[in-house]
Amino acid sequence: MNYKIKIATTGLLVFLLTSSAFADITDTIYTIEEIQVKANRLEQYLIGSSVQQIDSQTLNNYQSQSLAELLSHQSLVSVKTYGPGGVAGISIRGGGSHHASVIWNGINIQSPMNGEVNFSTLPVSFIDKAYIQFGGATTLFGSGTATGSIHMSDVLHLNSGFQADISGYMGINHPYSGLQSFGISNCLQSGKISYGSKRWASSLKFFYQDNKNDFEYQKTTNGPYEKLVHGSYNQYGIAQSNKIILGEKSVIGSDIWLLNFYKEVPSLMSSYDTGQSNQTDRNLMYSVYYKYLGPDVQIKLQSGGFYNQVLYENPLLEPPVTNNRSFSSINVVELNSEIFQNFQLGLIFEYKNERALTGFYSEWKTRNIISPVLSVLYENNKLAAVASIRKEFVDGSFIPLVFSTGLDLNIIPGVNLKAQLSKNYSLPTFNNLYWEFDGWSVGNPDLLPETGWSGEAGLHYSLTRDKIQFNSSAVFFQNNISNWMKWFPDSNKVWTPVNVQEGISKGMELDASVNSEFNKLQVSLKARYGYTNAIATESGEADIQTGKQMLYVPKHQAYVGANIAYKIYLVEYTHNFVGERTYDNYVGVLRPYTIGNLTLQASIPAKQKIQLVIFSKINNLWNTEYQMKNSYATPLRQYIFGIKFLFNQ
């Protein structure tokens, strides 16, 4: 079944589900509180872990950008990207990309082929709510959650009436060589149309971007400016969500995203050849759910999936086109019930089927994973504590039992002690297991799962006085990973994955924010600093130097931000610092860098219920030369201008 047929079939199923639900609703109007379908595992059972919520204002300011750009500017997540629009992975607390899961509306969208997600393909304008969860959570979210997870979800509001948010953007690169003038490089349109009544809500989002990505850069300090060639990319997508009240305690809903991302792959900065390859990423994510919210028991049934196709074309390779396809289908049953006073029991049963095919597999590869999860939560006015266990069966084989515990203790008013400990694991990916010999690499079917521990403890302080709110925290963490899977050349110079490494990462994270309001002036300040010491403690390979910082993991990372709003005006400034990173067997070092970004915005009431928002943004305000991956160019100063039309019935 090809990609377009799968999209059409899924869309038809979602349409039939919602249409049938409308047909079954009687004319009775139920007067109930608004029902929000929550990610129970994150919001109810992940006690003790550090969780950063990306606020709505930040999501709004990054509507013209990808999730990769938002994370790199607004968090301590280390983003590793092959230039603007290039494949982007992340590292949380020193782990690899496959150690951080990505949860979309409760569905894990990590690729079974490589365990990663390309964050450049995820537009911020499609995300209504986003969290960053730090620390291991394999018990709740399964394999690949050894160091943290990214959560994003769609949110619908009942009784909201008709609303529209239509935006248009254009981007301009600053010319430095004197050979060109200012010109539009990036054009982008996005929008969201939604409607909410007493018993149902629906939204439709769209996104389109065409970026020439022809910025100027310098190969060497004080060298001549050169224009990036063969680096353009374009993207389009659509998202649709529904939520329908069936009765006093029941709700059903659906979410679907369709995304297409085309990217020309430029050559390295060290190369004088023009790039000839390109890559197309196609993603389909869908979810349908039913939720019953009774006084003593809550039940959630969910079925969803993630289809990913990556077409890589390079006329110099044989074959010139590689077609990588993977599909994960997930079915989940969640039950939560209060068993005794202050005690809550959670049961989760998850079945996942993973399938993948590429020109370097002999056939379709499949994997079936069955996962029962048990959680017990105790909560009173002073203490919240949770314990969870998970047992997985992978194609009939047992994965060792994993567990987690967490607590949140209110020591004195405003001061909380939070702590969490978990045992984690990561299954080998299909590429690691099944990649057939292509002349220089081959998979290893004898790989063992990675195992390890994750723990953290910290103090969190909050104070609210008059119209000032202050929050701060100091968290210390440690992650241990055994049987770390790495690709290395064997005696015949053929690259293959092996379990070679014992790794440990430890460090601390400091966070502080203050929000205040004086008459019509609102001020928000925030700062966050992270220290991560991530090293290999044992290794059977000479290419891994024990005691050295992990490749591309900065020891020091920080950001500060200021947001000032007065009447119709808003000014936001963020400043990021990323410390030095090693690469190329620890010999090469990428210099530390700081990046400043400035946003200016004015909200103009056009007439009743209609508002125009005019804004401008300067990325890399201080014109910093930097690299996120060795030999991949990054832009100097860039300008973004836009206008947004808002309608609220």
Image (cartoon, grey):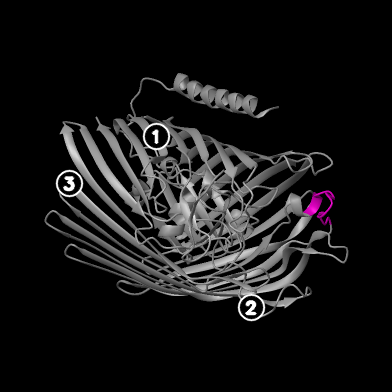
Residue 44: tell me if it is visible. Answer: no
Work out whether 319 lies above or below 61. Answer: above
Q: Which of 169 and 275 is in front in this view?
A: 275
- Local SS, label 1: strand
**Residue type, numbered disc 3:** Ile
* Label drawn at residue 568: 3
Q: Distance between the residues labelled 2 and 3?
A: 51 Å
Work out whether 327 lies above or below 409. Answer: above
**Residue type, numbered disc 2:** Lys
Q: Which residue lies furthest to the right in this view?
A: 492
Find out whether residue 442 is within the magenta segment.
yes
Residue 508: tell me if it is visible. Answer: yes
Marked residue nearer the N-terminal end (1 or 2): 1
Q: How far apart are marks 3 and 1 (CA)?
A: 23 Å
Marked residue nearer the N-terminal end (2 or 3): 2
Q: Which of 468 and 432 is in front in this view?
A: 432
Q: How crowded is mark 2: few (under 14 residues within 10 Å), some or many (20 or more)?
A: some
* Label drawn at residue 548: 2
Q: Residues within 10 Å of mark 3 (few under 14, many from 20)?
A: few
Q: Splitting the image into 4 quarters, where does residue 490 fall?
A: bottom right
| Main SS category, magenta section | loop
Work out whether 446 lies above or below 436. Answer: below
